[in-house]
Amino acid sequence: MPADTYLAEVGSQQITLPIIPVSDDLSIALMMVIDHGVRFAETAGRELAEHFADAGVDVVVAPATLGIPVAIEVTRALGLDDYVILQKTRKVHLGDALEESVHAITSTTGAALLLDRARLSAVAGKRVLFVDDVISSGSSSGAALRLLERAGADIVGIGALLAEGEGWPEALAPYVDRVAVLGRIPVFPRA
């Protein structure tokens, strides 16, 4: 395996991730779930869903874009038929969306998560499982959870394919007892 890659375990699966710089002093093993195929996502979604099988989940919520395959497969594995996606780009129908600012480790600029008001009834008063591909610093997940709570959701779980580094538990402190991940990856200091 090349020195600029990292072999990660994601539940029962192994994947090779490229190590890329995100700042002058930090590199990460970049997980792009959309680059690993349908079978990978299906297996990972099923294995992640097993952690929440007894949580009484009403709906799965994920952020666009990389959370979408995770949401689909976890929803399917839980035997549900609906999921909600928090958008990151303001489309014409999102003019009055609920909004929460966020700055992710892999983004070069600040952004926001948007919840379409037409989807409020899908989360308000519902037992919500929030899923994503990777939890890094916890800032994006924390923003999503704040947004969902403002919308009236009861957060029963947070799931991710991978947890990266050690900083995220502090950012998700109110929810850390409800987090399940399929694997962990380090961050890499740059020399």
Image: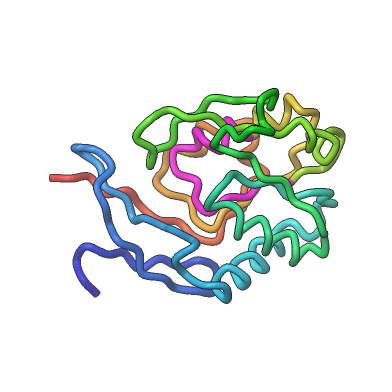
Q: Residue shown at 59%/67% (left/top)?
A: 44
Q: Residue shown at 19%/66% (left/top)?
A: 3
Location of residue 149 with respect to 183 vertically, above or below: above
Spot occupied by residue 101 in the image (x, y as percentages of width and height): 53, 25
Relative horizontal placement of residue 181, taking residue 122 as reference (left or right): left
Quarter of the image with the C terminus in it: top left
Relative horizontal placement of residue 86, taking residue 36 as reference (left or right): right
Q: Residue shown at 60%/60% (left/top)?
A: 69
Q: Is residue 43 magenta?
A: no
Spot occupied by residue 181 in the image (x, y as percentages of width and height): 57, 55
Q: Which quadrant of the figure has residue 6?
A: bottom left
Viewer-proximal residue, 110 or 19?
Answer: 110
Quarter of the image with the N terminus in it: bottom left
Q: Of all residues shown, which one is farthest toward the left? A: 191
Location of residue 118 with respect to 51 vertically, above or below: above
Q: Of all residues shown, which one is farthest toward the front? A: 92
Spot occupied by residue 74 in the image (x, y as percentages of width and height): 69, 61
Q: Is residue 143 magenta?
A: yes
Viewer-proximal residue, 191 or 120?
Answer: 120
Identify the image's colour scheme: rainbow, by chain, secondary structure or one colour: rainbow
Q: Residue shown at 74%/59% (left/top)?
A: 75
Q: How many marks?
A: 0
Magenta region: 129-144
Q: Which quadrant of the figure has residue 121?
A: top right
Viewer-proximal residue, 49 or 34?
Answer: 34
Relative horizontal placement of residue 45, taking residue 2 as reference (left or right): right
Spot occupied by residue 71 in the image (x, y as percentages of width and height): 66, 55
